Image (cartoon, helix red, strand yellow):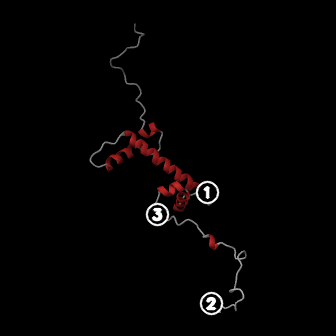
Amino acid sequence: MSTQKAVGGKSKPSEPKAVHTRSQKAGLQFPVGRIHRYLKQRTQHNVRIGAKAAVYTSAILEYLTAEVLELAGNASKDLRVKRITPRHLQLAIRGDEELDTLVRATIAGGGVLPFIHKSLTINQNNKPITTGPPGGSGVMGGP
């Protein structure tokens, strides 16, 4: 009878369970608990904030951050540098139509997008240059 395992009662505690944060459970890098705390602090009239709201918000922030960093990394790689600067962030955000509408802010140190108007790039050899009206004296504005 001593070979059977005791059922119920007090037993020695086995190994403690490994602690899993809500970020790990959701498979995210962004801190779900911290964002939940921030959401609770920013509400008025003591409104309850569900646990899924923090997970969803963390997932959105993580996705947007990954998207911007990927585009900025591509911009820095195109310019053959290894460090992402505010200029690369500016080029990445303004180069993407959806991110441009989302981020309507000035990026400090980002500069402006390179743009040259078409009329300034027309080759003068293709366009005939006239010195005056045909058959005129060559003096502008005079008969």
Picture quadrant of residue 120: bottom right
Closest to the observer: 114 or 18? Answer: 114
Q: CA distance from mark 2 to mark 3?
A: 48 Å
Kind of residue at disc 2: Gly
Upstream in sequence: badge 2 or badge 3: 3
The residue wearing badge 1 is 77
Residue 82, placed above or below residue 119: above
- Disc 3 or disc 1, which is closer to the eye? 3
Residue 106 got which mark? 3
Closest to the observer: 118 or 41? Answer: 118
Q: Residue at x 61, y 56 (%)?
A: 77
Query: How many labels sit on residues?
Result: 3
Q: CA distance from mark 1 to mark 2?
A: 55 Å
Upstream in sequence: badge 3 or badge 1: 1
Q: Position of residue 14 (x, y in %)?
A: 40, 25
Q: Position of residue 124 (x, y in %)?
A: 70, 76
Q: Residues within 10 Å of mark 2 (few under 14, many from 20)?
A: few
Upstream in sequence: badge 1 or badge 2: 1
Kind of residue at disc 1: Lys
Kind of residue at disc 3: Thr
Name the element at disc 3.
Answer: loop
Are the residues flagged by discs 3 and 1 in contact, CB closer than 8 Å?
Answer: no
The residue wearing badge 2 is 141
Q: Position of residue 45 (x, y in %)?
A: 26, 47
